[in-house]
Image (cartoon, helix red, strand yellow):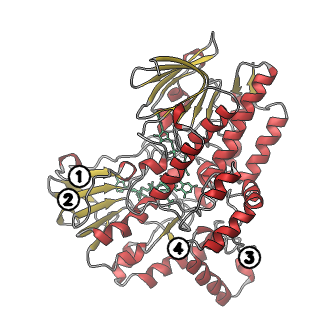
Amino acid sequence: MSSWHRVDAVVVGAGFAGLYATHLLSAHGLSVQGVEAGQGVGGTWYWNRYPGARCDVESLDYSYSFDDELQQEWDWSERYAAQPEIERYLNHVADRFDLRRHYRFATRVVAARFDEDRSRWQVALDDGGEVQARFVVMATGALSEPKVPTIAGLDEFAGRVVHTARWPDDLEVRDRRVAVIGTGSTGIQLVPALAEVAAHLLVLQRDPNYTIPAGNRPLSPDEVADVKRRYPQLRAQARHAANGNMPLRSYGGRSIFDVSDEERERVWVAALQEGGAPAFTRSFDEVMVPGPGNDLATQRLLQLIDETVDDPAVADALKPRGYSFGCKRVCIDTGYHATFNRPNVTLVDLRATPIERFDATGVHVGGRHHELDVVALATGFDAMTGALGRIEVTGRDGLTLREALGDGLRGYLGLAIPGFPNLFTVTGPGSPSVLANVVTGIEQHVEWVAACIGHLDDHGWSTIEADPEAEAAWLDHVAHLAEGTVFTAPGCTSWYLGSNIAGKRRQFVAYVGGLGTYGDELQRRTEDGYRGFVLQ
Ligand code: FAD
Ligand code: NAP
């Protein structure tokens, strides 16, 4: 590629979203320049190479549905595939649809400026290259910008410090003394995997999380064949489901208050044995609704910790306090709590004894010095806006995206931001995004973007842009839906609410009404002449 270059669309990112956008837009006859900071495809599944990384939506579901031959030819080995398998899958997709030729890898988009006279975006790359495009698709990921906390003395530590979302292939953890900071979904996957190989594992835990056994296992050829046979119908159902998942199993559908204590316990033992989040969250109607049903579910998961952890003091330290089940993103695990019965694992409850400081050889905490070789930061992400905010995006009238975002979230339907014509965000703020099977949400958005571009071309429009009033009304609606839910309950802090990033306004990131309902809203507004958008 020359340093200056003109295409119909720039797609930023080569994860599930970017790959599909590149495929679909080029299949519609557009010239596409893909740009990806990583050396290869995969996005989340390229970067998060930490031991234990795997999906928590079932593999047969957490995959593209747009091509039946693709879903028939690919065989998932486990109920929840591990990172290498998902990365292989996305490489297979890239090869199968010949997508790499569109991409510039190991390259970062640093700026994008809208040229109002020509209605074109000038996209600047960190290697000095520039691309002009009519459309920009920000497939930059909701969880792609790692959050590295400032911790006293950590920069003096002479061993290796790694963030889980930048886990290096050459990092040796076998027989090493390792500390993990962070016990969200990532830490909960990482801790059992590291404990198997490390000489000693120190888990530095601030807020513990509620977690449900994953029930991961190899997939049998029969169940794979069964799902493949029913794929067309199951995938269509996923598009209309609240959580964007295929109905692989049926759950609950009854009130927790209509059953006896014994029956509730029987259902929950079976759910925890089967594993996976939906078996528990959907066991009864009230599990994810603030109130007595959610309280009972919370108590059951606390009881599970007591049942699993040998030392009562350690069990107590592993128990969340001050917030109920469902507030933070539900975690699923493989042997997480049992890991704390191992002799080579030490838990430090940072709520009781915060980190004093790191030094060259380890960490001072709880009145002790722990010698360490590796510190693993499972400290999460600047979610939803982190990756977008790193790009200098300038729209109409010199408005920058950073100014537009301010301390909060912006976006109409999670797809477009007023003042930034022809720039689309995939699974952006205010769409179901991270609350549903993200791959289903990605397909829904990418297909909408491709159809929208087709509509503009068919009708001779040059730009589409979100209307500020429609955006404000949509964001109010999104906030209203989140009120009174487990996600915004008093005492709840989470990345869903932006609480993990200093200066972010407390605002729930996603549309709680369900992916299917959102899809209906999107369709109605589209059929209504792209209501809420301005076409010029
Ligand atoms: P990403 O996969 O994040 O890809 C975005 C890409 O954009 C990245 O590769 C990044 O390098 C690139 N990029 C960003 N900014 C720039 C720039 N300026 N220039 C160039 N390139 C840029 N979701 C589920 O539904 N189910 C799961 O089981 C699940 N498991 C997860 C496990 C982990 C460890 C994590 C972190 C997330 C998980 N998620 C899960 C959410 C997951 O992020 C989405 O499912 C999905 O992979 C997102 O795809 P994407 O293409 O939108 O974004
Ligand atoms: P996270 O949920 O934000 O968890 C970050 C953890 O780091 C929290 O325990 C947090 O504690 C802790 N932390 C942050 N800063 C700290 C500090 N300065 N000192 C001590 N502790 C600190 O991030 P994540 O675990 O990476 O997960 C992010 C999201 O990615 C998930 O919710 C999920 O959507 C996705 N994900 C999915 C899977 C999967 O199972 N498929 C796996 C990984 C990630 P506090 O809570 O006290 O702030």
Name the secondary structure under disc 4: loop
Mark 2–mark 1 CB contact (< 8 Å)? yes
Q: In which quadrant will I find the C terminus?
A: top right
Check mark 4 vs ligand 2: CB closer than 8 Å? yes or no: no
What is the C-alpha distance between the residues marked 3 and 2?
51 Å
For label 2, the residue is 373
Q: Please tell me in which quarter of the rendered image ligand 2 is found.
A: bottom left
The amino acid on which the numbered mark 1 sits, given as a three-letter code, is: Arg
Comparing labels 3 and 1, the label whose residue is closer to the camera: 1
Residue labelled with disc 1 = 160
Q: Residue 217 carries which label?
A: 4
Q: Is the residue 345 above or below the residue 18 in the image?
A: below
Q: Quadrant of residue 351?
A: bottom left
Give neighbour class at mark 1: few <14, some 14-19, many 20+ (Cα, 10 Å).
few
Residue 51, by quadrant, is bottom left
Disc 2 versus disc 1: distance between alpha carbons? 7 Å
SS of the residue at dot 2? loop
Q: Mark 3 points at which residue?
A: 255
Residue ID at (62%, 13%): 116
Q: Which of marks 3 and 2 is nearer the N terminus?
A: 3
Residue 308 percent coordinates (x, y): 43, 82
Residue type at tag 3: Ser
Three-letter amino acid code of the residue under disc 4: Arg
Q: Is residue 6 left or right of residue 415?
A: left
Would the CB of label 1 be found within 8 Å of ligand 2?
no
